[in-house]
Image: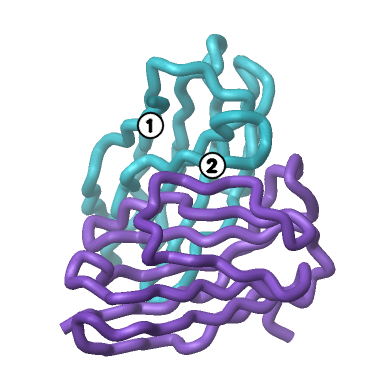
Chain colours: A purple, B cyan
Amino acid sequence: DTAVSQTPKYLVTQMGNDKSIKCEQNLGHDTMYWYKQDSKKFLKIMFSYNNKELIINETVPNRFSPKSPDKAHLNLHINSLELGDSAVYFCASSRDRRTDTQYFGPGTRLTVL
Amino acid sequence: TQLLEQSPQFLSIQEGENLTVYCNSSSVFSSLQWYRQEPGEGPVLLVTVVTGGEVKKLKRLTFQFGDARKDSSLHITAAQPGDTGLYLCAGDAGGYNKLIFGAGTRLAVHP
């Protein structure tokens, strides 16, 4: 069984569109995260949720809106996509907000044309 | 702003060679982690170091945390092609699992 899964794996879309990326973890973890990895492989945290509550909200355009329907899911919705949003987006989870080990999903490669 | 600088950025070596990757910062971190990422996959945690001066070994990989908890190193002995990948260090920036990542070292080990 996949611990942290993301859909879709690849997403190609036009500028201005709205898209969502879904993430699910079956580890029973309380805390989930979204990261963005740019073309230079620099990985930067965007958001973190603990038991459906937003606990980390980095300097991210408000076109990005995370949503956690339950603690096993953390989705990322992006409005009005821009060229600069092209990147690989990783979801991760950890047992709780203080536990070091984060388990990453396989990533979603977003390409905005 | 806490930053982690990794060096070298790229490393291309022959099988059997030894190598060291460095992760440096001017900030103190409560812990530092090393991850390995392969193409098309997410990072996978290798080790977490918490105590200043701590040394941890994982088979042919040796990890060290600096005494002042500002830097760390990863040493690989007798590298193998299977060690090829992107090595990332990450520091806990605030004790709430907010990880700050370095830019990574891309290692290629040739047979």
Q: Residue furthest right?
A: A28
Three-letter code, disc 2: Leu
Q: Report the residue at 68% width, 50% height from top.
A: A101
Mark 1 chain: B
* Any part of residue A94 in sight: no
Say if B92 sits above or below A14 in the image. Answer: above
Task: Please indicate whether residue B107 sits to the left or right of residue A39 in the image.
Answer: right
Residue B86: name its quadrant.
Answer: bottom left
Q: Residue furthest top?
A: B68
Quadrant including the C terminus of chain A: bottom left
* Picture coordinates of residue A90, whole percent (x, y): 48, 67
- Nearer to the camera, A35 or B31: A35
Say if B37 sits above or below A96 in the image. Answer: below
Residue linked to disc 1: B4
Q: Report the residue at 60% width, 29% height from top.
A: B94
* Picture coordinates of residue B31, whole percent (x, y): 62, 29
Mark 2 falls on what kind of element? strand
Say if B102 sits above or below A83 in the image. Answer: above
Gap in Å between the C-alphas at discs 2 and 1?
11 Å
Residue linked to disc 2: B99
Q: Report the residue at 23% width, 62% height from top.
A: A39
Quadrant including the N terminus of chain A: bottom right
